Image: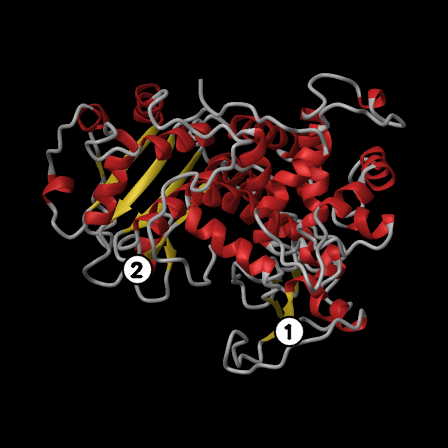
Amino acid sequence: MPLVPVVRRFAPFWLGLIALVVPVSAGAQPTEDRTYLRNKVSFRYVAAPNDTARAPAVLDNIGIWGGTETGAFWSNPNIPGLKNMVRALLQEPGHGGDGNLQYVAAQIIKVLNKPVIIMLLDDTGTAMNRGAYRKWDACTDGHGHAWPCASNMATGDDSRERCARELHQAVPARRDAWAGQMALGQAVFNGDLNWATSTFIHELVHTQDRSDGRAHMFWMSSRSYHYGADGTHYGVEAIPNLAATYQEGIANTLRLVVHAGRRQEMFDWFANNDVVYVEKALHPEGTGVGDTLPCYTSVTAPSPDVWLYNQLRRAGIRELSPSGGDVPADTGYAYYRIRDLPPRFIVHDEYILALTFSEYARHMGLPRFMAALQANDATLFRVSTSPVAQLYNTLCFAGLNGRPLSSVTGVNEAGPKPYLLPLAYADYFTGYNARTKSDYAAIFENMLRPEWVDLYWDGYKDEVRAAVPISAGRRPDFGDLTTIAITLGVNRSEPDAP
């Protein structure tokens, strides 16, 4: 969950779309999308979270879909934010419903095409206790409230099953007839409508994501270094585990799709070469090998990326001194300019991935991106690999429209080359900092098929960079992404809705 400040203003969905892109139509299929959501989302209202013996109330989706609001949930005056979210997803546009939100939410749930549980917690009263957080699978905001969070059932079931077998206990029943579960609390899920809806969308992506978190590569001395030693992450932080960057990056991709203000804010962060954080508090380098994960699952030698800060120091990347301005005086982190980092380190920030993929979706159409995400999820399930490389590979192959890769290798095509668009955007959002082909391949953990690397680097990289240079005298601009698309012959996107 990004912890950097968000833009506090309303902006309509798909704000400022260029003529190249066919926008999502708010009225094209509102009934179809909200009917799909009515059948796929189960809202569970928890009036008193600390009363874990009381079953939650299941909201009447059919009644809400038809405009009826009755029952304890609707009569509670303390939960306006939660009510607005339910209305936005199930009711008609113009009567509380948000057609664009319904469209995007339906696209996300279709990744697994399974129902999703959403716990709605009235956490405005007594601070939640530890039992309440466990019971409702909620995360803490550190002040007794429920911070929005979500999980996938299948990956959770796999973990519980593995743990039970290792401990010689009965294997619990699987719950993966459901895609996943989300917990939302009123205390923080209130106020800015754009923050609320985009946070919901972010968490909804997590319910669909079955990618492996590669925990075995980031566990030492009974401690996870998934996000670093402090166990948390910021939107403008380069974190050790690139698998976690992928998980947060695809969730933020869809956040940027529905929150134009956030999209502009994060593009400005990149364009202005603003600050990125890297945690400094590290486990002693090279130790901790041979430890075990909970339930005695074996671990591998730790990834060198656990020591991201040490790698940046050895690379001689200049740190910024805390000044009380945009660089906080927090000795737990080192601070850098985002476009000062080598490409392989830049992609450890979740919003670099989110900007790349959301711009692909904006230019090629959200359905095409979601179809690739669905295919990628099936490939990544129960497989430990580079999810970043795999998604780029999937997007590139999608751009071939059924042709074999051999049809474009060694060929300079005159027509549209959508298969190169994700690779060009990866180059752009790493500031063109790749000086060699190996630098460029490192963006994808050296796990992207070499044919794609060769094709872009040898055949089209110079043309793309010449079309939209990035330099000290030229600030990146949103129009650059369209120019890149046109440079690659992509002059028309696919429509988002029929």
Crowd band around label 1 with a 10 angstrom C-alpha radius: few (<14), some (14–19), many (20+): some
Whether residue 129 is situated above or below residue 455 in the rendered picture: below
The residue tagged 1 is 280
Which quarter of the rendered picture does the C terminus lie within?
top left
Is 209 situated above or below 199?
Answer: above
Relative image position of residue 467 (x, y in whole percent): 73, 44
Between residues 162 and 225, which one lies in front from this camera angle? 225
In the displayed structure, would residue 235 be above or below residue 230? above
Residue 176 seen in this snapshot: no
The residue depicted at 61 percent of the width and 56 percent of the height is 349
Q: Please, what is the three-letter code of the amino acid marked with disc 2? A: His
Which one is closest to the eye, mark 1 or mark 2?
1
Q: Give the residue number, with chain letter if any, for mark 2.
A: 145
On the question of residue 268 being in view, the answer is: yes
Residue 446 occupies which quadrant of the picture? top right
**Residue 24 location (% of width, % of height):** 43, 29
User: Within 10 Å of the Cα at label 2, are there few (<14), some (14-19), or many (20+) other Cα atoms?
Assistant: many
Toward which corner of the image does residue 12 lie, by quadrant?
Answer: top left
Quote the CA–CA distance across marks 1 and 2: 29 Å
